[in-house]
Image (cartoon, rainbow, N blue to C red):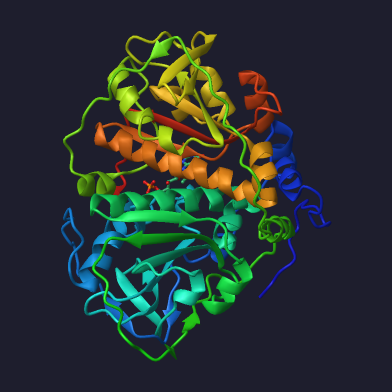
């Protein structure tokens, strides 16, 4: 059932430069947080697991080993891909209530998991061509239809993922700002998939531009699910089978008693459906006085890294530092993704670097010191007072060039920038885990305060994501 919401959302639709209006409206400030306190309606919390009821369901082989080549049979191949990108990997137990909840390979703001993984397969061995939805709660594939579904994405790859967002899951907690987090989440999920595919010797390609409504219709998506990103995976042997199309469809489970509408989210989503493509423009280039050394190496296997990755609740403040080669190992894998995002680092404890704020210049792998001094209070304060950004060894502000993205892609550019931020976040998470460190994505920050502190001009960009990396404190609630 749809319900009226009671907060101060703008009643008008977002018309001109919708991204700007949405972004401004969802900025955090001390005043905005005071103005709109929010009590969570636990009885109406959305189910983090979607099921399409009434369709054939296939077990994916449990605990598949990750091999450097994809398994020959379709079900093991799919199991490998999903086990190392989207499956449940741990749980937490709340001692006071006995409540246990699942954690997944891909992170998600508030662990609310707005992202759903759908996929089209074609020609996999012993696996019927068709359209499937991944059921992470039991590591199974729901077969929504069999047949040739190349037309949905115009791709002939053997596996094509369509990542969707259920914004309500996120809006339940984060209200209007939730759309930003849905986009970050998609960026994380994209990289989770892409890196799992790469570990298996497969290529992947993300497709950001597609006709949203046509895809949603062709997939017979439930109305609360929106297609956000298409990811092609190539590398498996593919021998197309001939199948007549048969639709099972299935009935999507209801996620909560009521869905509270957020017109502002509906409006930004509608605005970002329009496809505009012009020249992307140049990312700024520059240099710094500190050249990063070769990255520190890790011998931890990829499968172990992704399955043990967790968000740190907080970090050990103390004196323990990371080395410059470790910092290089965190930044180097993120560099190729940096197109609209500029990385600013709040360096608290990195051997060989004085405390301060640095800008990372990816082209030559250099750091530029832009502010000197202890940044611990500033980093935590700017991250809505979250201690973890001060106790980390290094914290980050990701500055997104939203103007350039809008010039290149219209309002849809807003999606691009946030996908990129989430994707960089995913690489930072895995880089940290590989080095035996911990990491946490931080979606909550005082937007304008960050701009003022870093002296970022509106032409340069706006903060879109924060991040922190350090030595994690153990979480007693965590169960393997
Ligand atoms: C986009 C995004 C924003 C997040 N923001 C915060 C945050 O502001 N503070 C925090 O402590 N954790 C934050 N997290 C971490 C999530 O709470 C965490 O991913 C989630 O609880 C699931 O735990 P896991 O990462 O260990 O699987 C964020 C994660 C993502 C992906």
Residue in the foreground of this view, choosing between 215 and 143:
215
Instruction: Identify whether 358 is placed above or below 121.
Output: above
Residue at 62% from the left image edge and 35% from the top image edge = 401
Residue at 33% from the left image edge and 24% from the top image edge = 328
Q: Can residue 462 be spotted in the picture?
A: yes
Residue 267 horizontal/vertical position (percent): 73, 58
Residue 360 horizontal/vertical position (percent): 47, 22
Residue in the foreground of this view, choosing between 61 and 74:
74
| Image mark count | 0
Residue in the foreground of this view, choosing between 253 and 367:
367
- Quadrant of the rendering where the N terminus is positioned: bottom right
Q: Is residue 355 left or right of residue 183?
A: left
Residue 52 horizontal/vertical position (percent): 44, 79
Residue in the foreground of this view, choosing between 317 and 104:
104
Q: Furthest-front residue in view?
A: 279
For ligand 1, give the image quadrant: top left
Tell me which corner region of the image, top left, top right, bottom left or bottom right, holds residue 427.
top left
Q: Furthest-right residue in view?
A: 12
Q: Can residue 479 be spotted in the picture?
A: no
Residue at 74% from the left image edge and 43% from the top image edge = 20
Residue 191 horizontal/vertical position (percent): 39, 49
Tell me which corner region of the image, top left, top right, bottom left or bottom right, holds residue 221.
bottom right
Instruction: Identify whether 157 is placed above or below 217.
Output: above
């Amino acid at each position: 059932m749809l319900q009226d919401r009671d907060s101060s959302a703008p009643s008008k639709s977002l018309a001109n430069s919708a991204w700007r209006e949405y972004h401004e409206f969802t900025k955090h400030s001390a005043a905005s947080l005071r103005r709109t306190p929010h009590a969570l309606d636990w009885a109406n919390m959305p189910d983090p697991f979607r099921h399409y009821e009434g369709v054939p369901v296939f077990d994916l082989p449990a605990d598949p080993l990750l091999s450097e080549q994809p398994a020959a049979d379709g079900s093991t191949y799919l199991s490998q891909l999903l086990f190392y990108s989207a499956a449940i990997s741990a749980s937490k137990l709340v001692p006071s209530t006995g409540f246990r909840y699942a954690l997944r390979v891909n992170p998600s703001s508030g662990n609310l998991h707005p992202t759903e993984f759908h996929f089209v397969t074609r020609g996999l061995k012993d696996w019927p061509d068709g359209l499937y939805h991944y059921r992470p709660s039991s590591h199974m594939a729901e077969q929504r239809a069999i047949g040739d579904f190349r037309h949905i994405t115009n791709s002939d790859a053997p596996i094509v993922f369509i990542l969707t967002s259920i914004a309500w899951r996120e809006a339940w907690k984060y209200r209007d700002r939730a759309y930003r987090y849905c986009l970050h989440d998609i960026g994380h999920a994209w990289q989770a998939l892409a890196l799992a595919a790469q570990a298996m010797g497969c290529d992947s390609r993300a497709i950001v531009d597609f006709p949203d409504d046509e895809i949603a219709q062709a997939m017979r998506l439930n109305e609360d699910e929106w297609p956000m990103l298409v990811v092609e995976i190539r590398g498996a042997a593919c021998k197309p089978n001939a199948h007549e199309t048969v639709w099972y469809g299935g009935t999507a489970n209801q996620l909560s008693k009521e869905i509270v509408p957020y017109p502002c989210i509906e409006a930004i989503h509608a605005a970002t459906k329009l496809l505009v493509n012009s020249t992307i423009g140049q990312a700024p280039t520059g240099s710094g006085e500190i050249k990063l050394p070769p990255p520190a190496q890790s011998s931890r296997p990829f499968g172990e890294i992704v399955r043990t990755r967790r968000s740190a609740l907080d970090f050990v403040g103390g004196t323990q530092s990371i080395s410059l080669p470790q910092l290089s190992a965190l930044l180097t894998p993120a560099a190729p993704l940096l197109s609209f995002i500029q990385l600013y680092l709040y360096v608290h404890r990195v051997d060989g670097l004085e405390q301060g704020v640095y800008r990372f210049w990816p082209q030559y792998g250099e750091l530029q010191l832009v502010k000197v001094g202890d940044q611990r209070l500033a980093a935590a304060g700017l991250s809505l007072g979250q201690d973890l950004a001060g106790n980390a060894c290094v914290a980050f502000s990701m500055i997104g060039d939203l103007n350039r993205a809008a010039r290149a892609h219209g309002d849809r550019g807003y999606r691009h920038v946030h996908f990129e931020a989430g994707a960089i976040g995913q690489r930072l998470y895995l880089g940290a885990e590989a080095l035996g460190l911990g990491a946490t994505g931080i979606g909550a920050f005082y937007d304008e305060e960050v701009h003022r502190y870093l002296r970022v001009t509106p032409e340069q960009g706006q903060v879109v994501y924060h991040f922190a990396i350090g030595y994690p404190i153990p979480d007693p609630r965590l169960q393997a």
